[in-house]
């Protein structure tokens, strides 16, 4: 058992906080959250969290881990050209080893910036499972695909066997899912078949949806309907869908997503950087959809801090509506934690609550930007730097302590990552 004592605790189930509280972790779960008391029990580990904030770890509900390998190379290019002329050709050369070290680098950055649950939507998912297992992170790892003439049946078979093999591993710390790249790379029939398989296996399906106006207009030209309208007709939303982006939505399309309890992941930094548009955060929030935060890949963000994207989502909502009350710090922090967990299929993750999984971060408030600790929600949402995270606990295990990651040899990963990066980009 681990005791964390004397902490400022933000459980996130209600808009309140505990000024001086304790948390007890037993195995992978939270056994106690409440005010500080004298404990008679023996603990294997006691962490004195005086002057520290403890909150649930961040959840990154849309990203492509190994895209760290393409970070900082091609900026200032719109999505379609960026994908077709730059990203897709390099992705054809990726090896399993590249993806393994690219993913580990992303995992290191994520742990350092307080992410405890992540997803992956990329190639070679088996090696990503290996990287996640070794790191101790919680993750939903998808088998990603798009249409290939004559191969759709084989791809779906492979996806199904991946999910059967890897879903619900490591005591539920690892889930598996299907991920269709997008309506512009996959046929409506493949979407319909994927939904049926996902429902049969009881897993989520991830996809990119309505990211750019051009993609929506091109699709209308081809099918006479928007991607959401067409996929609705195909029964795709009967599955548990988690859709990334959703920048360009009509009210009727929001209704379709709402009716089917589709999860929506905001990726504001990637949308802004690629010039795709500005998601209507306040409207989506008001609609009652389960909204969460994703960073997208490191090549379109270009970092993996959920905190940064959460903050950007808040500021966009306020700026676009010209109403600073359109989202508050507590709500935003729920988007970046418990809502993300739900969008990735984790039902007992993202709150500091008895019986929930013990995933949390400890933040030292002695940092210069955090010393005035009157309202910890405000401090986190508006003033904290991602690197203010001191300690990270996932599934009841200390993964980072005082800024040192205990599960990964960072220098080794960095050196192998650079080898892959140089080979791929012919540097
Ligand atoms: Zn993406």
Image: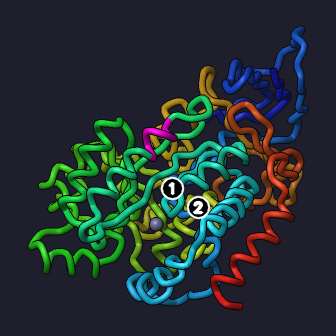
Residue 9 screen position, x and y as percent: 72, 34
Residue interval drawn in magenta: 162-167
The picture places residue 401, in percent across and down from the top left corner, at: 86, 45
In screen coordinates, is 170 left or right of 179?
A: right
Looking at the picture, does residue 165 appear above or below residue 249? above
- In primary-sequence order, the first of circles 2 and 1 is 1
Report if residue 143 lies within the magenta region: no
Q: Residues within 10 Å of mark 2 (few under 14, many from 20)?
A: many
- What kind of colouring is applied to the model shown? rainbow
- Above or below residue 373? Residue 146 is below
At which x and y percent is residue 167? 49, 38
Q: Please tell me how many numbered marks the rendered image carries.
A: 2
Find residue 311 and name its label.
Answer: 2
Residue 52 point in image, percent of width and height: 83, 41
Q: Is residue 158 visible?
A: yes
| Quarter containing the C terminus | bottom right
Residue appearing at x 18%, y 59% in the figure: 189
Residue at the spot of label 1: 293
Query: What kind of secondary structure does the magenta stretch mostly adopt?
Result: helix
Indicate the quadrant containing the N terminus: top left, top right, bottom left or bottom right. top right
Is residue 375 in view from this perspective? no
């Amino acid at each position: 058992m681990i005791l964390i004592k004397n902490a400022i605790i933000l459980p996130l189930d209600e808009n309140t906080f505990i000024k001086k509280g304790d948390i007890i972790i037993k195995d992978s779960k939270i056994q106690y959250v409440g005010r500080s008391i004298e404990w008679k029990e023996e603990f294997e580990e006691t962490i004195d969290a005086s002057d520290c904030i403890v909150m649930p770890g961040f959840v990154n509900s849309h990203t492509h881990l190994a895209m760290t390998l393409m970070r900082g190379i091609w900026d200032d290019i719109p999505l379609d050209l960026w994908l077709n002329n730059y990203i897709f050709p390099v992705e054809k050369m990726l090896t399993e080893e590249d993806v393994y070290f690219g993913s580990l680098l992303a995992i290191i950055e994520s742990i350092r910036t307080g992410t405890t649950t992540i997803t992956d939507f990329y190639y070679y998912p088996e090696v990503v499972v290996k990287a996640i297992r070794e790191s101790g992170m919680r993750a939903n790892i998808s088998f990603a695909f798009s249409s290939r003439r004559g191969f759709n049946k084989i791809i779906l078979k492979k996806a199904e066997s991946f999910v059967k093999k890897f879903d619900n591993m490591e005591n539920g710390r690892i889930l598996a899912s299907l991920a269709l790249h997008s309506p512009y790379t996959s046929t409506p029939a493949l979407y319909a078949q994927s939904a049926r398989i996902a429902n049969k296996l009881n897993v989520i399906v991830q996809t990119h949806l309505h990211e750019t106006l051009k993609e929506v207009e091109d699709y209308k030209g081809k099918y006479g309907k928007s991607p959401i309208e067409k996929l609705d007709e195909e029964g795709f939303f009967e599955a548990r869908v988690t859709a990334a982006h959703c920048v360009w939505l009509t009210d009727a399309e929001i209704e379709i997503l709402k009716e089917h309890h589709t999860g929506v992941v905001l990726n504001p930094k990637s949308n802004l950087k690629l010039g795709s548009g500005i998601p209507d955060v306040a409207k989506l929030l008001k609609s009652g959809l389960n909204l969460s935060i994703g960073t997208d890949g490191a090549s379109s963000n270009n970092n993996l801090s959920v905190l940064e994207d959460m903050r950007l989502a808040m500021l966009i909502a306020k700026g676009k509506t010209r109403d600073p009350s359109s989202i508050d710090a507590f709500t935003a922090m729920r988007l970046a934690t418990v809502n993300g967990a739900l969008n990735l299929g984790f039902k007992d993750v993202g709150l500091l609550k008895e019986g929930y999984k013990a995933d949390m971060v400890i933040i030292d408030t002695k940092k210069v930007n955090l010393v005035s600790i009157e309202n910890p929600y405000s401090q986190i949402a508006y003033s904290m730097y991602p690197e203010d995270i001191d300690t990270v606990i996932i599934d009841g295990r200390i993964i980072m302590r005082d800024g040192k990651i205990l599960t990964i040899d960072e220098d080794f990963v960095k050196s192998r990552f650079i080898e892959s990066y140089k080979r791929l980009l012919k540097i």
